[in-house]
Amino acid sequence: MQKRVDYNKLIFESQIGLNGIDPTLPTGEYGDDNFSYLDLNANCKLEKPFERQVRDATWRAYFHLTEPAESFYNYNVNKLNAHYIWIWILQNWDG
């Protein structure tokens, strides 16, 4: 995953004065303007006939296997916790 911000396309409070917006003033923001990290996910789908006219389907997914951390600032890190979902569906089947 790669994330990027272009500070030149943003206007910050410190750049607004009595005469309006002055983009030459410092933004007061600091930190990296881009970063990247490895984020692995896994999923599978299982499907089978359950009875004569009914089909059983299940989807399972596991997100953020590596539990990466993301931040433009080194001190304020947002950790992406791993999580798991499971969806199960019974549906009528004409086939």
Image (spheres, grey):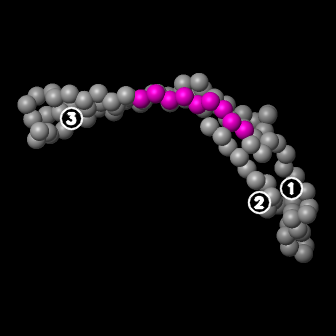
Q: Is residue 63 left or right of residue 12?
A: left
In the foreground, 68 or 35 = 35
**Tag 3 secondary structure:** strand
Residue of label 1: 27
Q: Mark 3 or 2 closer to N-term?
A: 2
Whether 41 is drawn above or below 19: the answer is above
Q: Are marks 2 and 1 in contact (CB under 8 Å)?
A: yes
Q: Earlier in the sequence, mark 1 or mark 3?
A: 1
Whether residue 3 is situated above or below residue 23 in the rendered picture: above
Badge 3 density bin: few <14, some 14–19, many ≥20, Cα 10 Å: few
Task: Report the residue that reaches farthest toward the left.
Answer: 52
Query: What amino acid type is highlighted by mark number 3?
Result: Leu
Query: Residue 7's quadrant in the figure?
Result: bottom right
Q: Is residue 69 left or right of residue 47?
A: right
Which residue is denoted by mark 2 in the rendering?
A: 10
Q: Residue at x 86, y 73 (%)?
A: 20
Circle count: 3
Q: Residues within 10 Å of mark 2 (few under 14, many from 20)?
A: few
- Residue beneath label 3, please? 90
